[in-house]
Image: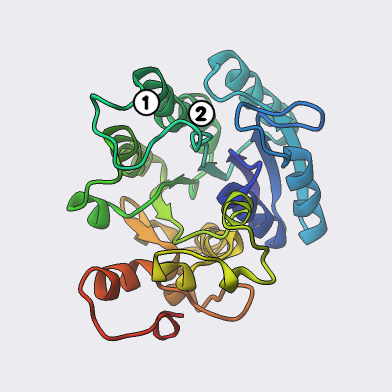
Amino acid sequence: MIALVAGATRGTGRGIAVALGAAGATVYCTGRSIRGQRSEMNRAETIEETAELVTAAGGTGIAVQVDHLDPTQVEALAGRVEREQGRLDVLVNDVWGSDHLWEWDTPVWKHDLDKGLRLLRLAVDTHIISSRFLLPLLIRNEGGLVVEVTDGTWEFNETRYRENVYYDLAKMSVNRLAYAWSKELRPYGGTGVAVTPGFLRSEAMLDNFGVTEDNWREAKVAHKSWLVSETPAYVGRGIAAIAGDPDKQRWSGRSVDSGQLAEAYGLTDVDGSRPQVWRFITEVEETGKDAGPDDYR
């Protein structure tokens, strides 16, 4: 399996890349942050680290520094994959890089316009640019898979306003892109699907709450859904399962969450649990139902 994870530096992208590596894939890990050169996110994680984790998991990790907003760089990336592999089986569009750009519960007339528009470019344009140059490799053989990583399924987001107009548009747009790819790939036997993790215990989130993966339950978080959170490996395992599924087209055009994939494929998170945070939010946090987080793990 030849895979490319666009936005593999940290968080969900890293979890997906490593899970694909554990399935034996060769994984191109792309992003802007390399050793000695951080992106505007100013985080310590690098694509080289992710590639090394992929290789340690049993695959072959290849780090390539790419700014996915730059069509020239993405076209060069596609050319390299073509020269080295001759095909692409899995494309994961996970580029985000906008945590520093958006403001919670801020109306459009108060939100910084330049930051909002930059968020949309990073969250949506990057996915389209990547698909423009990499899908021609993916359609060479039947069975190609494109995964759009988002926050919240289409069904969840459709009836809820997600924080502000820029974030809301970004996450709904990515869901719609997966549907678009499902239509464009259908004549070539390809699959397009949107996948969302739950409340993610990413490197940044753990740092934000002042905890580690070893003591994450001690974090002081207002939302009980934190106790139904998951590691990046959980959604990674789900996407790796789709990639290896001979009947993966059953997912095409759909928008699903990590918990649904875990149930469908009999997967668990690294601690053996099976978090269902989106169900917890809708069934407990939003309704006041008398149930605890452990009932959704």
Q: Position of residue 12 (x, y in %)?
A: 56, 51
Judge by depth and name the residue closer to the eye, 240 or 224: 224
Residue 262 drawn above or below residue 132: below
How far apart in space, not on screen, are marks 1 and 2 (Cα)?
A: 21 Å
Q: Quadrant of residue 65?
A: top right
Q: Residue at x 78, y 49 (%)?
A: 60
- Neighbours of disc 2 within 10 Å: few (<14), some (14-19), many (20+): many
Secondary structure beneath label 1: helix
Q: Residue at x 47, y 24 (%)?
A: 129
Q: Residue at x 44, y 59 (%)?
A: 248
Residue 221 drawn above or below residue 292: above
Residue 151 drawn above or below residue 173: below
Q: Position of residue 140 (x, y in %)?
A: 53, 36
Q: Which residue is mark 1?
A: 116
Residue 218 drawn above or below residue 32: below
Secondary structure beneath label 2: helix
Q: Quadrant of residue 185?
A: top left
Q: Which residue is mark 2?
A: 130
